[in-house]
Amino acid sequence: MRRIDGGVSSDIVGSIGLLLVCLLISFFFSATETAITAAGKIKLKSFENAYPQRKKGFQWLGDNVQRALTVTLVGNNIVNIAASALATTVATGFLGRRGPLVAVVVMTTIIVIFCEILPKSISIAYKERVLNATLPALQVIYLVLGPAVYLVQKVVWFIGRLIGLTLDASKSFLTRADLEIMIEESGESGALEEDERKMIHGVIAFEETRVSEVMIPRTDMMTVPYDTTVAEASKIFLETGHSRVPAYEKELDKITGVLYAKDLLGPLSGGHLEDRVEGLLRKPLFIPETIKTDEAFELMKKSQIHISIVVDEYGGTAGLVTLEDLLEEIVGDIQDEYDDETPDVFDEGDGSYLVQGYVNIEDLSETLGYPFEFDDVDTVAGMLLTIIGNFPEEGQSVRFGPWSISAVEVVDHRILQVRIEMIGEDEDQ
């Protein structure tokens, strides 16, 4: 064993040099692994546009995420084992029999802090920069360790089969739940405005919402008898501002067609005010109340119809829904010059809220930040009926959790408005 100046073996000096190299490579692998997992496939796609000079590299990484991660794990374990062996050699050369124990303590500290925590923390904060810097070296190492990576993956796949697990690396990196969490966090951090967050949430929830939750109930439907005159129908259109109105024969469960305001222009210009509108009616589109809003939207768009009659399980008229109602689930309320400007939930400024009876319970929960949860009803009016157990009188109130809920306007057994006021701590229900 040759010695150099100071009496230190040249082999030990070489081991120290190799040890430092192994620690640097371990730093590289840990940083790269965390940057890949922190970015995910969606971010990798965006990096392709952000770094045109690395576009092919990011495309390769996006197509081989699982193999690239395996490369970093295999490589990291190889260099960590090598570093531990070299550290033991160096420590033994200086300390003799106490060397291995000292090597374990020192290397554990160094690897945990400088080769795990530090590079991974940097990669989480600067994943874009880390991947841009490490990607070329990763591709080269991938070529070198390719056979070993392939073998490791096959062994892991075989073990998974033995224990009854399907280790499918092709599964999506981003689930629906992940996307919803990302939207919430983006809203809290300020990356998305509140209106933007609500719109994206509306798109995600669109296919989970039933038409019965957004329709205009039959009690609020504006309709005309099928044998009404052009003059009478014109007056209704002028008073309501609607452009389309269902027509019925004898009762609401027999909708015979839909009357369009523009179809009255011909008879009006010709002076046929007393003609019946029966011949002007267009064929109605009927949809079940259980259909999802996205399916109803596609059906109405394909049929080029802007209004549909919603029927219940017995074939009776449950209500109606328009394309505007469906779009409002995504973009929020669309007001025109004929709409009632009264907001669905009005903050009165003293801890109380004036709420329209038709407001959906889920929307109320989101607005007030409190879980109003009922299995059998969808609206605030139904919620109050359920809590009280009977039809309330105007002014009657009831306690629900930390809220006082009172009936403000009740007409013909219909709860039109309620006031919800925060009064104190939650009670046991």
Image (cartoon, grey):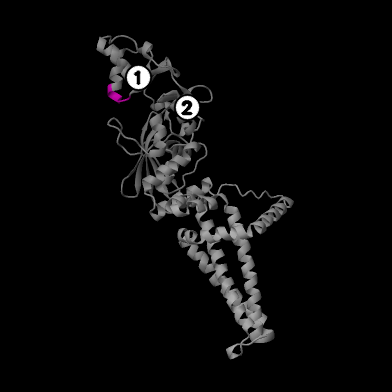
Q: Is residue 145 left or right of residue 34?
A: right
Q: Residue 296's spot in the image, x, y percent?
A: 47, 29
Extreme residue in the right direction: 162
Relative to the observer, which residue lies in front, 223 or 60?
60
SS under mark 2 = helix
Q: Residues within 10 Å of mark 1 (few under 14, many from 20)?
A: some
Residue 272 left/right relative to 41: left
Give the residue number, with chain letter if any, for mark 1. Answer: 260
Res. 398 visible in picture: no
Q: Quadrant of the N terminus?
A: bottom right
Residue 300 versus residue 310: which sits nearer the camera?
300
With respect to residue 52, does 249 lie above or below?
Answer: above
- Label placed on residue 36: none
Name the residue rendered at 37%, 48% in the picture.
194
Q: Main secondary structure of the magenta part?
A: helix
Q: Disc 1 on helix, strand or loop?
A: strand
Q: Is residue 75 visible?
A: yes
First in sequence: mark 2 vs mark 1: 1
Along the line of sight, the residue nearer the viewer: 80 or 366 = 80
Q: Nearer the viewer, mark 2 or mark 1?
A: 2
Q: Position of residue 358 (x, y in %)?
A: 40, 35
Badge number at residue 299 = 2
Q: Position of residue 414 (x, y in %)?
A: 40, 31
Q: Is residue 189 magenta?
A: no
Q: Which residues are magenta?
A: 238-242
Instruction: Give the residue type at disc 2.
Output: Leu
Q: Nearer the viewer, residue 95 or 367?
A: 95
The spot of residue 76 in percent (x, y) is: 60, 65
Identified by mark 1, the residue type is Tyr
Image height check: is 302 above or below 354?
A: above
> Label 2, label 1: how many angstroms apart (C-alpha)?
20 Å
Q: Residues within 10 Å of mark 2 (few under 14, many from 20)?
A: some
